[in-house]
Amino acid sequence: MAQISNMELENLRHLISSEQLCYAKAKVFAQHVNDPQLKNYLEKQARSAEQSIQNLNQFFFS
C-alpha cells in the first residue's frame, strides 16, 4: 500500500466513523418504524453504510 499522510488517515477515520453512525441510526430507526416503505428504505441505507464501512476499511487492511 502506498504511504498516506496523517491528514489522509484522519480523513479515512472520520469517514468510517460517520458511516458507522449512519449505519447504527438507520438500523435503530428501521426497527422502530411501522411504515413498510420507510422500513425498507432505512434498511437499504443501513446496508449501504455497512458496505461503505467495509470499502473504507480496505484502505487499512489491504
Image: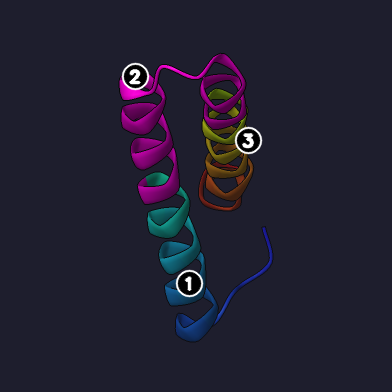
Q: Position of residue 44 (x, y in %)?
A: 62, 27
> Extreme right residue here?
2
Query: As shown in the figure, which amino acid type bears the numbered disc 1?
Result: Leu
What distance separates the C-alpha of mark 3 from that of mark 2? 17 Å
Vertical order, 49 against 5 (above or below): above
Instruction: Give the residue number, with chain letter if any, for mark 1.
Output: 9
Residue drawn 52% across and 32% down?
46
Assess disc 3: are there few (<14), some (14-19) or many (≥20) residues with their C-alpha within 10 Å of its C-alpha: some
**Residue 25 on the magenta span:** yes
Q: Are marks 3 and 1 in contact (CB under 8 Å)?
A: no
Label 3 vs 2, first from the N-terminus: 2
Q: Position of residue 7 (x, y in %)?
A: 48, 85
28 horizontally vs 52: left or right: left
Residue drawn 58% across and 50% down?
56
Tag 2 secondary structure: helix
What distance separates the C-alpha of mark 1 from that of mark 2? 33 Å
Vertical order, 33 against 61 (above or below): above
Where does the magenta region start and end? 21-42
**Residue 38 on the magenta span:** yes
Mark nearer the viewer, 1 or 2? 2
What distance separates the C-alpha of mark 3 from that of mark 1? 22 Å
Point out which mark residue 48 bears: 3
